Structures are given as C-alpha cells and as structure tokens.
Amino acid sequence: MDIVLDFLSNISWWMWGLIGLLLVAIRDVLQKRHTISHNFPIVGHFRYMLESIGPELRQYFVSNNREELPFNRIERGWIYASAKQQNNYEGFGTDRDIYEHQHIFINNAMFSYKLQDNHPNKVDPSFIPCAKIMGEYNKRRKPYRPGSIINVSAMSFGSLSAKAVESMNKGVKMAGAYHNTGEGGLSHYHRSGADVVFHFGTGYFGVRDEEGNFSLDKIKKLVEDFPYIKAIEIKLSQGAKPGKGGVLPASKITPEIAEIRSVPLGQDVLSPPTHSAFSTIPEMLQLIEDIAEVTGLPVGIKAAIGKMEQWKELANLMKKTGKGPDFITVDGGEGGTGAAPPSFADHVSLPWVYGFSQLYKVFKDRDLTDRIVFVGSGKLGFPAKAAMAFAMGADCINVAREAMMSIGCIQAQVCHTNKCPAGVATQSKWLQNGIDPTLKSQRLAQYFKTFRKEFIEITHAAGYEHPCQFTMDDIDLNINDRDLTRELSGAFKYNKKEVPFISMQDLKDCKYLGGKDAHIGDIEPPKETTKETTTLVN
C-alpha cells in the first residue's frame, strides 16, 4: 500500500491532467448517446460548450445593433439607460433602415402643443393617466382610472422570482401605475401598496375551491382583505401559448407557493387549456357580472387574437344586453415571458397590430368602443410603438419583458430553465441574491417615468395634449415599393373612434384616478449611475 501511495504522490500535476483526459476519452468512445463525442473524443465536448454560450456570443460579439430578437441591442440599451437615468440619446442620426417594411412615421404638427404655466405636465413631465375610466359605463361601484398609461403586465410569482415581483410592485407604486398579478395569485410580494389588477386563468390560483373550481366567495374575500386590488382580469389566452394549459410539477410547489395558489403540496397542479367556470359567451358574461356584483370592481378579459367569430358574438351580446367586460387586454402573438413550445410561440395567434385592428373594428362597428378600456400588450414599451397603439385605439399599454429588463433582465432567454442569470425568472435563492428591490424598484419607476416623458413629448410634437387624441391619420407605415408609405387608416381599413377628452387637468382632478399616492418627481436616481454612458450590463 505504501508503494502505491508513494507512486501516486510522485505523479506530477500535468500527468494527472493527461490521465483525466484519457478517462474522458475512454468514456466518450464507449458511450453511444452523443455521436459527436463518440466520433471525436474530448474535442467533441468543445462543440457542446460553444453551443451552450452561443446566444451570449451572438449577443455581444456577432449581431449588429438592430439584428437581435425579441429585443435588439438598441431597444435593450434604451430601456437600461432610461431605467438608470443615463444618457439614452443617440448621435449622428439614426442607424435604423427607415425604409424597412412597417417602419413607423409619426406625423408631427407645424406647431407643437404649447403647455401653459399651470399645466400638470409643467409640474410633472411624465404625468399621463388613462383617458377612460374602467367600469364607468357599467356603473361598477368602484370605477378605476389607471394613473399611468403604461403598467406592468401579467407575470406571476413562480414564473418570476420573489425579489423581481417585489421590485416591480414597489416600482409601480412610485410610478403611480398598476401591477397585474399574473395567474399565480396575489403573493406577499404584490403587497407593497401599489394598485393591483388581480388576474386569474384556468387554474383559478388563489381563488379556487378544494376541487380546483372557481370560488366567488374567495374572490370576494380577497378584494375585501386587500383594497389596493382595483380591477379583476380573466385570462382567456396569452400571446406566447394561446389555447394551451400547463402543469406545475409537484417538485416546484413550495409551502409558500401552495398557500398563495391554494393548491396541495406534493401533487402536480394542472392548468387546463379551457375554463371550467364557463364554456360559452353568455356564461362568460354572467361570470363577469357576478364578479363585478360581489366585488364592486371593474372586470375585464385578456386574450390573444385569432378567429373572430366568438368576438363578434360577444360584441353582439354586449350590444343587446348592455352588459360586458369593462376592459379588454389584447395580447400579441409576439408576447411571452416564460416557457412556450416554439410551435405556439412562433405560429399561434396574430401579432398585436393585426389582432388588435381586427378586434377594434368589431367593437367600433357596433358602437361599443366607449364602453371599453382597450389595453395593448406585446412589445409596445417604446414611445413610438405606443403612439401607433394609441392611434389604433388602445387606451393603455401593459409591458412585461420591458419591465423585466428595467430591473436587470439581460435577455439570456433561459426563463424556462430556472437558471436566469439575472435572478429575475428563477426560484433559485442564490441567483435572486443579486436583486436589490430598493434599487431595482427605482429603476422600474424611472423607466416608466422616462417612457411617459418621451411619449408626452412625441404627443406634443404631433400637436396634441394627450395620446388618446392620436388618430389613424397621424401615423404612417412603410408598406411596399409601390405604395411607399400609407396612413394607418388606409393600411388597416378603419378610423379610430374619438375618445372623449377635456384636458389633463380634468384627468388629474378625477376622483377615480389611481396612483394618487405616487410622488413621481421624488424618484432619486440610483447612486452608482451617471448620465454619461449607456451600457447593456444591467
């Protein structure tokens, strides 16, 4: 034994390295699972290593500034710089191909809208509340006017980390916006005092009975216990995977998640593709009315758009009965923050501009648009895209991935692996440690503030006081070589109905205005940032 130990102790470090490589080579040759490793022992492993970091290599070294998807480097850089109060300008003119298909042109006025000395935007340059009131037409007991035209979209605790949700909730409180819970239920991390839109899907998490069915009593108690819930949203489908359910594996259900979602420990939990509380349009309308009656809150629906027959049935029934959803959130097929099969994410449901235009026409043709607050969702978190959305008929926008980037997401595109390096889309406590909710909440609030400030400046450049005044003729799109550009009204074959609007001061004085406790002008920039540089490291 001593001889063996003595022999081993005399082996140099580089010989141990060769022995290790030899063992790997023998293992590679003997295994049959990976052809590359079998045919090219040792060397084949480099192929898998390079493949694993391929997205990062392309993101930082290969792709140009306008090339990447879902969000290119310029878009991400603008969000990061806006969130950190850094310089988000660009020099030497645009590097975008302004002749590309569907490029947006906003038609500016000869004379911009001029602010009077006592105008609300003189006091707060980022003040833009929604021009419509949710629940006003249907005379809900607690109508709600969103205090911000940009808000956090439905992303649940479980899909996002605890610290990410907490950061967003604190941030939207500072920004006077609302926070949509996503279908994971109202967690402890949604309770920092921001306005909340409670969202539920087919799993009814947080408002389900012991059999997994929707419970009217539970949603009533939830609203009574948490008065900062300002509206209820029923998810019919989402952009990333419309018409597909999901499974929450038992291994991922912690006691905390089980409590929040009202699900048992130790069992897989199914989110079916369809609702059990209703299966027809009349049944859905009845559920909307039942929820509104017991809670007093505005109730809306969220969906990605595909076939239009059932939307026409809904509009016809609303016209006939005088009832219906108080708001409709339209998700685009380009949306998505978590996991979805590529076949769904790439091909099922229409992109936002196509889906929304078709939906809006259905309700406009029946003179129903005044009843509904239209919320757009699907890569609209940039002022120019928002201007187009408002010109088409949107009244608010919800942002998901843009909000994630403002608090640190680097578009690693590993949301579905629970290994998000930024700690945003993971339940790993170690990865979450990099998120400081105090700092990140300021960044989200600052992103919202910067977005609204630039959006209102674009609005003024077009000659308007509020974005709701945009019309379809204020935006041009590149169509093709023969038509060159075409106004939205010509491209989508309709004109948006005029939204009643008096003044910004009138909106500010509204008793139903949300986010009244926000002190947007008091947001302090994160201490470690400067205004000199823009970086993609968030």
Image (cartoon, rainbow, N blue to C red):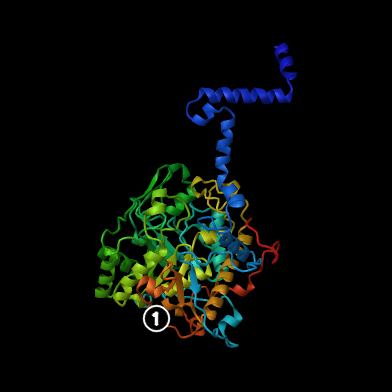
Residue at (58% x, 71% y) in the render:
449
Q: Considering only vertical position in the picture, is 537 above or below 250?
A: below
Residue 349 image point, x, y percent: 37, 58
Residue at (41% x, 53% y) in the render:
346
Residue 517 image point, x, y percent: 55, 74
Q: Considering only vertical position in the picture, is 63 above or below 146?
A: above
Left or right: residue 426 versus residue 215 is right
SS assignment at label 1:
loop
Residue 296 image point, x, y percent: 38, 71
Asked if residue 296 shows in the view, the reply is no
Asked if residue 527 shows in the view, the reply is yes
Which residue was labeled with disc 1? 498
Label 1 environment density (alpha carbons within 10 Å; few <14, some 14–19, many ≥20)? some
Location of the N terminus by quadrant is top right
Residue at (31% x, 78% y) in the render:
367
Location of the C terminus by quadrant is bottom right
Residue 495 image point, x, y percent: 37, 77
